[in-house]
Amino acid sequence: MHETIALRTSGQGLYEFTRAVQRFLSDMPVRNGLLTLFCQHTSCSLLVQENADPDVQADLKAFFRRLVPPANDPSMSYLEHRTEGPDDMPAHIKAALTQTSLSIPVIEGRLALGTWQGLYLFEHRDAPHTRRVVAHLLEG
């Protein structure tokens, strides 16, 4: 049982999609199992992160921008891949440092997330994109 969830982004940042995943689960006959989420892109990633305080998202975005600045920053002069703009190779690095798949238990038809946890696509590119995340539920 699977579905592809399309997420529109408007530039770098975290985009919560917990509700979209829960809607997918509500249509499934399986009540208990393991949900795998897989991002079909190399310049964004997936996170389980706090969904209560927006400062957490702002701080994460600022941290990763400081950790991996744009390719036109002098500290990134060693980069060779530059054909898709100054945000592209840094986006690939950020995705390599994070994760492109998540596994979350499903119990009684609900994600087994903690109180303040949400599912996020972490967009690492500046331009808007439509991103695809495959949700696959395995009965267990």
Image (cartoon, rainbow, N blue to C red):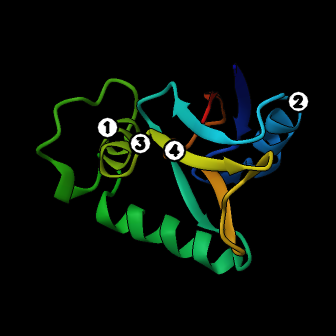
Q: Quadrant of the N terminus?
A: top right
Label 2 crowding class (10 Å Cα cut-off): few <14, some 14-19, many 20+? few
Q: Which residue is mark 2?
A: 27
Confirm or deny contact between disc 3 and disc 2 (CB under 8 A): no
Confirm or deny contact between disc 2 and disc 1 (CB under 8 A): no
Identify the residue shown where x is 60% and y is 36%.
140
Mark 1: which amino acid? Met
Closest to the observer, 54 or 21: 21
The picture places residue 13, in percent across and down from the top left corner, at 60, 55
Q: What is the quadrant of residue 74 in the picture?
A: bottom left
Q: Which residue is mark 1?
A: 89
Q: Nearer the viewer, mark 3 or mark 2?
A: 2
Identify the residue shown where x is 77% and y is 32%.
30
Cα separation between marks 4 and 3: 28 Å
Cα separation between marks 4 and 1: 27 Å
The picture places residue 49, in percent across and down from the top left corner, at 58, 65
Identify the residue shown where x is 38% and y is 43%.
95
Taking 27 as reference, is 80 left or right? left
Mark 2: which amino acid? Asp
Cα separation between marks 3 and 2: 38 Å
Cα separation between marks 2 and 1: 38 Å
Label 4 crowding class (10 Å Cα cut-off): few <14, some 14-19, many 20+? some
Taking 72 as reference, is 103 left or right? right
Label 3 crowding class (10 Å Cα cut-off): few <14, some 14-19, many 20+? many
> Which structural element holds mark 2?
loop
Taking 103 as reference, is 79 left or right? left
Give me the disc on residue 103. 4
Any part of residue 132 in sight: yes
> Which structural element holds mark 4?
strand
